[in-house]
Amino acid sequence: MSSATCRACGSDDIEVIVSLTGKAITSLAVTINAPTRVHHCQVCGHLSTVNQIDQEIYYSNVYDTVRDDADDLMGVDSDGRPVYRIQRQSEALMQIGPLPDQGNLLDVGCGHGTFMRRFSEQMPGWNTWGYEVSHRYARNNISIGTFPDGKFDLVTSWYVLEHVEDPASLVSKMRDRITERGTIVIAVPDVLANPIDVLSVDHLSHFTSRSLAGMIRRTGLHVNEMRSDAIPGTLLAVASAQADTMPTMSVDDDATATTELTKYWRNAELELRTFCGAQQPQRRSIAIYGAGVYGAWMLARCGLANDRFACFVDMNRRKQGSVFEGIPIVGPKDLPESIECVLIGLRPESAEGAVQMKELEGLECFRLPDWNPHLESRKNQVATCTK
């Protein structure tokens, strides 16, 4: 598929909304020397990134999915306990509706099979199969390169569609493998809830609820449910070959919000560089709070060399003691006394809480501007989407 066409609907009525040179960031939270170029479809509103990565090499040798002992930290619950991605996926699936005691599951883009194992623990009467593109994930119940034979009662796809050149084609293959009353569950990053997604160059698609629902329906499926509240920063779509079972509701028009993304990141980078430029003459000791994709963006776009940073700070104990982009990662309690200022590399809605941490008391902090494109009305959305 041409990079000059929309990946969701195939239209060539697109405009460039992001065009950056220099270092780019990936969803793995690493920086690469590549341009970032994003198109906005004028027909369906989808955002497509021009591919800058050799897909075969990247997914065979570089990109790796989470394992049981290295799950992604998504945040903390109301009691301050860590919440991990696979945990939230399992909880979200069980919230969709009761599943029969027995059935067949296909997990598309299953990686090491972590979700499949969690699902089997919860639903021991089900058989599970997986599909992947890289032989590094080969297992007895994981097919490489082609879907396993047969029909499935449930097909899941967790954070896969954003990575592929032709997501609609993959959804069509999933449609062909469900039983007559089978269900497809698709999770993708919600670019309007997690604005950094639009700058992740290995994410070739950046979905809104409108563009995701439209793409699914173009494959001949019905969208039974679209949730933005099940997993942080995620759109969760439930689709089937059956007619929609819920009253159709409109979703917010995303045209204005996607336009605002461009302004947001342009202004954020200007503010970041202004702040860091003020530290340059003083040679102050600087740390970045958050060894994730937001922290990687700050490192890539701040205008300072990596050796200007003393450390990254991260609450994820699995990261502490390791090195990120050549810079050591420490926990908040191990923040060196020499640190004078901190770049808060977290989601905008989480940054204020970090600034208030006692470990950062008295330090000069830079945080991202607020980002709230109509999110209050979308926060608890549980609806189907109009065509």
Image (tube, rainbow, N blue to C red):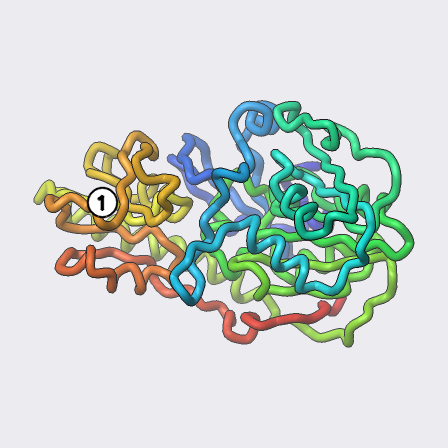
Position of residue 274 measured from the top left corner of the image (x, y, whole percent): 22, 52
Q: Nearer the viewer, residue 382 or 257?
A: 382
**Residue at x 68%, y 29% (from the top left corner):** 133
Position of residue 82 measured from the top left corner of the image (x, y, whole percent): 43, 54
Question: Can residue 15 be seen?
Answer: no
**Residue at x 48%, y 39% (from the top left corner):** 70
Question: Can residue 337 be seen?
Answer: yes
Q: Secondary structure at mark 1?
A: strand
**Residue at x 46%, y 53% (from the top left corner):** 74
Residue 116 falls in image quadrant = top right
Q: Nearer the viewer, residue 15 or 221?
A: 221
Q: Nearer the viewer, residue 314 or 277?
A: 314
Residue 313 vs 95, above or below: the answer is: above
Q: Answer left or right for 193 relative to 294.
A: right
Position of residue 40 measured from the top left corner of the image (x, y, whole percent): 59, 53
Residue lying furthest left in this view? 282
Position of residue 122 measured from the top left corner of the image (x, y, whole percent): 67, 52
Q: Answer left or right for 267 relative to 254.
A: left
Q: Answer left or right for 245 relative to 226.
A: right
Three-letter code, disc 1: Ala
Mark 1 — residue? 287
**Residue at x 76%, y 43% (from the top left corner):** 106
In which quadrant will I find the N terminus? top right
In which quadrant will I find the C terminus? bottom right
Residue 321 falls in image quadrant = top left
Q: Pointer 1: residues within 10 angstroms few (<14), some, or many (20+)? A: many
